[in-house]
Amino acid sequence: MVVIGGGFAGLSAVRELAVADVEVTLVDRHPYNTFQPLLYQVATGALNPGDVTYALRAFISRYRNATFVRASVTSVDPQAQLVHTDESGPLPYDDLVVACGVATNYFDIPGAAEHSISIYTRAGAIAARDRVLSALEKVSLRRTDTPAPVVVVVGGGATGVEMAGALAELRNEAIPLAYPEIQVGEVQIILAEMGEHVLGPFHPSLRRYAAGALRRRGVDLRLGTSLQAVNADSVVVRGPSGESQTISCVATIWATGVSAAPVVRDWNLPTGPGGRIPVGADLRVVGCPQIFAVGDVAATEHPLPQLAQPAIQSGKHAGVQIRRLLAGAPSQAFHYKDKGIMATIGRSAAVVQLPFGLRMRGLPAWLVWLALHILTLVGNRNRLATMINLSVRYFTWPRSLNIVVGDPVDTPLR
Ligand SMILES: Cc1cc2nc3c(=O)[nH]c(=O)nc-3n(C[C@H](O)[C@H](O)[C@H](O)COP(=O)(O)OP(=O)(O)OC[C@H]3O[C@@H](n4cnc5c(N)ncnc54)[C@H](O)[C@@H]3O)c2cc1C
């Protein structure tokens, strides 16, 4: 068996397959699993990159019949049942699980791919952190040629709201202590959302709460505002009444839009909406009975949210179905169990929407968010480190300041 991708869906599939009498090879372009929901905490200096990443070799070492290959998949040959990569020789499979997630979509906005920082990867989150903290260092020198510390966050979904909220807390609580040379009011956090509200999939009352919580933290929330272009030191936006404005900024953080990675089109598999791989009811790829596609990359008959739970549940389903098929049983249809959605704006402020119309906001929602995110992390060490680091951020600021060090390093942005 080969599983492409060590994210939520891929690890879930490996867990099910590794208990069967089969050999499993997990292949990922990175040697680690990334817990994307907390990347924005890395981008704002609260967590170390290692707190939200977990070595895939450590994961694989739990299973006797599983191995790991670090390589990028370049193509799949469904006839010969081979996976080709850039590093290893061809990987043969009897059954294949494609769980390679999605990539940032810049919607062809001029300059967006070149000049904005996507926080969808570990490298992107580190780059965002280094850019913002370095800009603050420059501003603290009070030179006349220093650009105003304006950060533009693009997209009012959960990622953009969480990023803007965390940046606002960094500004409000850390700057007075760490950068006494800078007035808090000098630092501007703009959240640009082209729709009329933030957190589209949430109930209107929760959207209003989130917008209010952002504004109370001093985020300049611009609804009905679309991005026209991104430059190295500015963005061009169009506001609700159609007027264009150029905003100088030290960083443009991309927190909106995903589609299948362009490379998937070269994998000899069918592709559907957003470049995703169309699957049938049991999650097998249309026309390829030996291949399952799960998680974000799969285009199911009834679209699923691009979240951790559908990825975890679909990965597990694929693993179970392969076991059933090996035992001569027919495959079963996948049914997603909705466990709700949540987003946090900052300390004591979050929104939780559960099935059957149950809703929470404020401190209780935030405590649920905190507990769930820590529990879902892979690895006990990561859970402990995240618990300690988030406790420092949320319970000791501004008395103690413990920002993870940020300094520009030569990393790719995505
Ligand atoms: C910033 C951010 C915040 C989020 N916050 C939340 C949240 O709060 N709650 C929530 O439920 N969901 C959240 N999500 C969504 C959630 O993280 C995804 O839905 C989930 O990670 C999808 O899992 P996956 O296994 O399909 O893909 P991924 O987790 O993306 O894993 C894909 C894996 O495939 C590997 N891969 C990709 N291409 C190749 C290749 N060519 N060769 C080899 N390996 C490859 C990648 O390295 C990666 O390890 C967030 C996403 C982002 C980006």
Image (cartoon, helix red, strand yellow):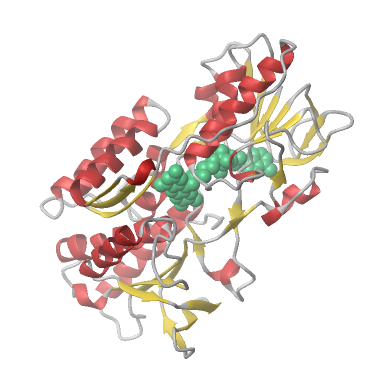
Tell me how many marks there are.
0
**Image quarter (top left, top right, bottom left or bottom right) of the N terminus:** top right
- Ligand number 1: quarter of image: top right
**Residue at image x 30%, y 66%?**
211
Near-viewer residue (287 or 264): 287
**Residue at image x 27%, y 52%?**
350
Residue 375 place in picture, x, y as percent = 34, 31
Residue 177 place in picture, x, y as percent = 15, 61
Direction from residue 235 to residue 180 in the image, left or right: left
| Visible residue check, residue 29 | no
Q: Quadrant of residue 138?
A: bottom left
Direction from residue 84 to residue 152 in the image, left or right: left
**Residue at image x 42%, y 49%?**
39
3 to 320, vertically: above or below = below
> Farthest residue in the front direction?
356
Residue 114 place in picture, x, y as percent = 59, 68
Direction from residue 300 to residue 342 in the image, left or right: left
**Residue at image x 40%, y 75%?**
223
115 to 263, vertically: above or below = below
Near-viewer residue (223 or 410): 223
Q: Quadrant of residue 250?
A: bottom left
Residue 115 place in picture, x, y as percent = 54, 70
> Farthest residue in the right direction?
79
> Farthest residue in the bottom direction?
243
Near-viewer residue (91 or 199): 199
Q: Quadrant of residue 220?
A: bottom left
> Farthest residue in the left direction?
399
| Visible residue check, residue 60 | yes
